Image (cartoon, grey):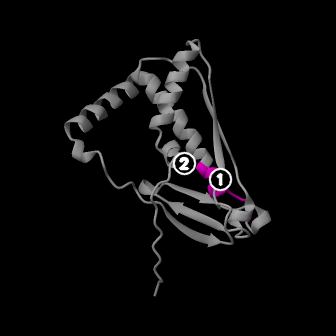
């Protein structure tokens, strides 16, 4: 999609939500995960979308698909890249190649239940952004900071998001 089409679509969405603020909040489409075998999981989403995960062999998985933790980092990286492109399009700015690398630090004592004081999830994450082009550094930093503040996945990994797990036994 060209920058102009993206800018036009964003302007339309902004105008619609501004005129209908009650429609801004909604329930996101569900992801339904089903354990296939071992530690391999198939996740189904809307419109037939799916993704398969697996765990590394070191914890009993088959290492045949990305782990859920890697997908979290992939979601963070792709969301930041997307929001950078969206902001540039809104501003009518043409960017070169956008590269976002996300890594994190974890402690396996958490996931293995060896120490309840150690979180099971990442202890920290880091996103490194590189954009090719001839724009002044301060303009690039401004676009990146805007994306950081408005990226839903970055937001989700940066703050405590209320979450519940409901348990139900099947028949």
Residue 26 seen in render: yes
Q: Is residue 37 left or right of residue 3?
A: right
> Left or right: where does residue 114 sit relative to residue 167?
right
Q: Residues within 10 Å of mark 2 (few under 14, many from 20)?
A: some
Q: Is residue 26 above or below residue 54?
A: above
Dot 1 corresponds to which residue? 122
Q: Point out the tag, 1 or 2, that comes first from the N-terminus.
A: 1
Q: Is residue 100 left or right of residue 7?
A: right
Give coordinates of residue 36: x percent, y percent: 61, 71
CA gap, disc 1 and disc 2? 9 Å
Residue range in magenta is 62-72
Left or right of 82: which side holds 11?
left
Q: Residue at x 59, y 71 (%)?
A: 35
Pointer 2 residue: 157
Q: Is residue 24 above or below residue 44?
A: above
Most extreme residue toward the right is 58
| Helix, strand or loop for disc 1 | loop
Q: Quadrant of residue 9?
A: top left
Q: Secondary structure at mark 2?
A: helix
Is residue 95 visible in the rendered image? The answer is no
In terms of depth relative to the viewer, which is nearer, 51 or 26? 26
Q: Residue at x 58, y 20 (%)?
A: 96
Q: Of all residues shown, which one is farthest toward the bottom?
A: 171
Residue 31, x across and y down, in percent: 47, 60
**Mark 2 and mark 1 in contact (Cβ < 8 Å)?**
yes
């Amino acid at each position: 999609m060209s920058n102009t089409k993206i800018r036009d679509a964003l302007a339309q969405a902004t105008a619609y939500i501004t005129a209908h603020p009650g429609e801004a909040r909604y329930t996101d489409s569900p992801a339904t995960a089903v354990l296939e075998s071992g530690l391999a999981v198939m996740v189904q989403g809307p419109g037939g979308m799916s993704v398969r995960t697996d765990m590394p062999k070191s914890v009993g998985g088959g290492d045949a698909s990305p782990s859920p933790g890697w997908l979290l980092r992939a979601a963070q990286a792709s969301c930041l890249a997307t929001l950078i492109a969206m902001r540039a399009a809104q501003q009518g700015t043409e960017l070169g190649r956008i590269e976002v690398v996300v890594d994190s630090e974890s402690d396996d004592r958490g996931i293995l239940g060896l120490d309840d004081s150690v979180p099971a999830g990442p202890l920290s994450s880091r996103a490194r952004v590189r954009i090719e082009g001839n724009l002044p550094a301060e303009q690039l930093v401004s676009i990146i900071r805007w994306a950081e503040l408005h990226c839903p996945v970055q937001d989700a990994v940066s703050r405590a998001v209320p979450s519940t797990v409901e348990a139900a036994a099947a028949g």
